[in-house]
Amino acid sequence: MSRVRISSVDFMSSFEEIEHTADRAFRVRGRTLAELLENAALAMSAVDGLKPGAKPSITREVKVNGVDRETLLVNWLNEILYMEQTRGEVYDRFHILEADDHHLRAQLHGGKSSSTVSQIKAATFHNLEVKQIPEGLEATVVVDV
């Protein structure tokens, strides 16, 4: 399996795709919950491989709730998928405006989809845990393809 890695300046802004028997999975890290959520969205976007059309110019604002950090993470990723599928758009930049363990408000940036077929059906709770690490937070996310 190929590894996908996108990183900015340091370790905490990175994610990597990891092997999974039936679906796709990635490990994501962030210094804060907001950064973890942004990086998870970037990772899912990279794993899916869809790109906005030539002129990315759409910004959407979303609000997502969850009973805990794990539910918030899954609901966030599934909200992105829902927005992409129902609006025919692809998002490749994500900005968390506010976040706590139960709520987030964010902006999605992208454009009309150049392809209508997403590989990812949904983010799942399979073995999901948002855990504290010395550098911040880490989660392994499995997505159903």
Image (spheres, rainbow, N blue to C red):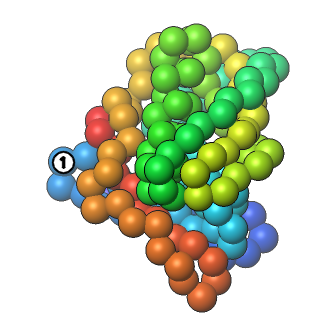
- The number of numbered badges drawn on the structure is 1
Direction bottom: furthest residue: 134
Check disc 1 and give the amino acid type.
Ala
The residue depicted at 39 percent of the width and 66 percent of the height is 129
Q: Position of residue 31 (x, y in %)?
A: 69, 72
- Quick one: 81 or 34, which is closer to the camera? 34
The residue depicted at 48 percent of the width and 56 percent of the height is 68
Q: Position of residue 77 (x, y in %)?
A: 50, 40
Direction left: furthest residue: 21
**Above or below, 136 relative to 72:** below
- Quick one: 5 or 58, which is closer to the camera? 58
The residue depicted at 64 percent of the width and 68 percent of the height is 30
**Above or below, 13 relative to 82:** below
Q: Which residue is mark 1?
A: 22
Which quarter of the picture shows residue 88?
top right
Q: Quadrant of the N terminus?
A: bottom left
Q: Position of residue 51 (x, y in %)?
A: 60, 28
Q: Quadrant of the C terminus?
A: top left
Left or right of 35 on screen, residue 88: left
Which quarter of the picture shows residue 63?
top right
Left or right of 81 on screen, residue 125: left
Q: Position of residue 12 (x, y in %)?
A: 66, 73
- Quick one: 134 or 145, which is closer to the camera? 134
Left or right of 13 on screen, residue 132: left
**Above or below, 18 relative to 50:** below
